[in-house]
């Protein structure tokens, strides 16, 4: 069987079973110091303006300290297998998502290296050979960590570059086709208006087909509008925005089966934001339509809202089947869809609108518990995309 990337990396740095044993011994020495190491680690980050900016919009530092302690447990206890490798890859992808520059990863790893070496130097009970083994094993595992993160970082950046190139080609195509389609649709719409005023419209069957034609024209116009919105930076209309009112307005445009319950909590307590209510309404409509279709005839869709010190967080969850792992990374790409009908513009448009507001959206996998989308919007004025 072919050697995996992780096996190749371990062979390259010479990571052997004796290194695993040395790391487990180091865990016994270092584990009581994990909380103190986490304090030093985040104090160093918060002292540095460039590094601390990467944490803006992420979870509170207190939560991150707990996460770091878990990371240290896994670092020193293993098992150092393929599951370990894939977990570390996910961490690398988070670094890409929050735009953490690579040199900060090296700096952060050096802080941990110094703290662990300090603990080894303070240990007087072990033999010199055991302490040397701990130092060697520590160097190897931290080198492996950096190699995995940088590999994932490069992999995701290349994927982002490829997506940007596809979007550029997509934009050129849409820009030319979209405007050309407006003309025939306009002619059809005018002809339909004339036909509705003729005796033909009194025929029940003919009238029904005329209505269907009108519905399809509206659908086609909406697709063209969405396509054009994807390629142009439509300026936001800056005005006070109450998300509770935007949500209620969006609900009027979404038809749900009788067995589907749609509810929200926390919106009324949110402060007035500044942004474009019309575009935010489109965000809610697109997400709600996706959720209702995913749920089917019976289920729940819930939006919960909370306010932080710098932003508001909106979590939309449904009781549907969720999104399979194979396409989660491509959810927000144009023309990516799993539906029998639709061309895959809803989520890309949602992402673009939120980014215009200085916000973000991510999909969170919840195996067996349906889809979960987390949106974040800055408090105060929408700092990006305003014109």
Image (tube, rainbow, N blue to C red):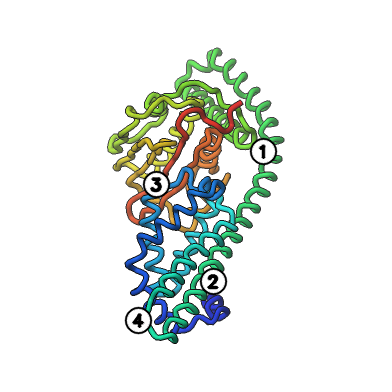
Indicate which disc, 4 or 3, sits on the residue closer to the N terminus.
Answer: 3
Indicate which disc, 1 or 4, sits on the residue closer to the N terminus.
Answer: 4
User: In front of the other: label 2 or label 1?
Assistant: 2
Q: Where is residue 294 in the image (x, y as percent from the top left)?
A: 39, 45
User: In front of the other: label 1 or label 4?
Assistant: 4
Indicate which disc, 2 or 4, sits on the residue closer to the N terminus.
Answer: 4
Residue 2 in sight here? no
Task: Kindly identify the residue that appears in the image at 45 percent across and 52 percent down.
Answer: 43
Judging by the rendered image, the residue that carries numbered circle 1 is 174
Judging by the rendered image, the residue that carries numbered circle 2 is 143
Relative to the observer, which residue lies in front, 292 or 187? 292
Image quarter in which the C terminus is found: top right
Q: Is 116 drawn above or below residue 254 in the view shown?
A: below
Question: Residue 304 vs residue 227: left or right?
Answer: left
Task: Kindly identify the residue that appears in the image at 54 percent across and 82 percent down.
Answer: 14
Question: Residue 55 vs residue 300: left or right?
Answer: right
Judging by the rendered image, the residue that carries numbered circle 4 is 125
Q: Is 194 drawn above or below residue 91 in the view shown?
A: above
Q: Position of residue 158 (x, y in %)?
A: 63, 57
């Amino acid at each position: 069987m072919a050697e995996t990337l992780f096996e190749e990396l371990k062979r390259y740095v010479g990571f052997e079973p004796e290194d695993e044993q040395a790391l487990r011994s180091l865990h016994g020495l270092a584990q009581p110091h994990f909380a103190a190491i986490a304090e030093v680690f985040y104090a160093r980050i918060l002292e540095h303006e460039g590094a601390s900016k990467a944490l803006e919009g992420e979870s509170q530092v207190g939560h991150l300290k707990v996460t770091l302690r878990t990371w240290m447990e896994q670092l020193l206890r293993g098992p150092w297998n393929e599951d370990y490798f894939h977990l570390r890859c996910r961490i690398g992808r988070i670094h890409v998502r929050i735009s953490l520059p690579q040199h900060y990863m090296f700096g952060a790893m050096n802080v941990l290296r110094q703290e662990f070496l300090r603990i080894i130097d303070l240990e007087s009970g072990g033999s010199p050979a055991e302490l040397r083994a701990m130092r060697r094993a520590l160097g190897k595992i931290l080198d492996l960590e950096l190699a995995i993160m940088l590999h994932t970082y490069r992999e995701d950046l290349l994927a982002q570059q490829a997506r940007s190139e596809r979007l550029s080609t997509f934009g050129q195509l849409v820009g030319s086709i979209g405007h050309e389609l407006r003309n025939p649709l306009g002619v059809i719409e005018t002809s339909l208006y004339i036909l509705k005023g003729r005796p033909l419209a009194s025929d029940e069957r003919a009238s029904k087909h005329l209505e269907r034609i009108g519905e399809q024209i509206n659908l086609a116009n909406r697709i063209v509008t969405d396509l054009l919105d994807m390629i142009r930076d439509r300026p936001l209309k800056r005005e006070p925005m109450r998300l509770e009112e935007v949500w209620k307005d969006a609900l009027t445009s979404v038809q749900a089966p009788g067995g589907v319950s749609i509810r929200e909590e926390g919106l009324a307590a949110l402060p007035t934001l500044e942004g474009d209510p019309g575009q935010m309404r489109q965000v809610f409509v697109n997400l709600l339509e996706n959720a209702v279709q995913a749920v089917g005839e019976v289920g729940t869709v819930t939006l919960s809202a909370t306010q932080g010190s710098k932003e508001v967080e909106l979590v939309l969850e449904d009781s549907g089947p969720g999104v399979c792992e194979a396409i989660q990374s491509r959810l927000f790409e144009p023309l990516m869809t799993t539906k029998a009908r639709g061309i895959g513009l809803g989520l890309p448009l949602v992402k673009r609108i939120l980014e215009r507001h200085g916000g973000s959206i991510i999909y969170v996998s919840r195996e067996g518990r349906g889809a979960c989308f987390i949106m974040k919007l800055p408090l105060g004025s929408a700092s990006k995309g305003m014109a």
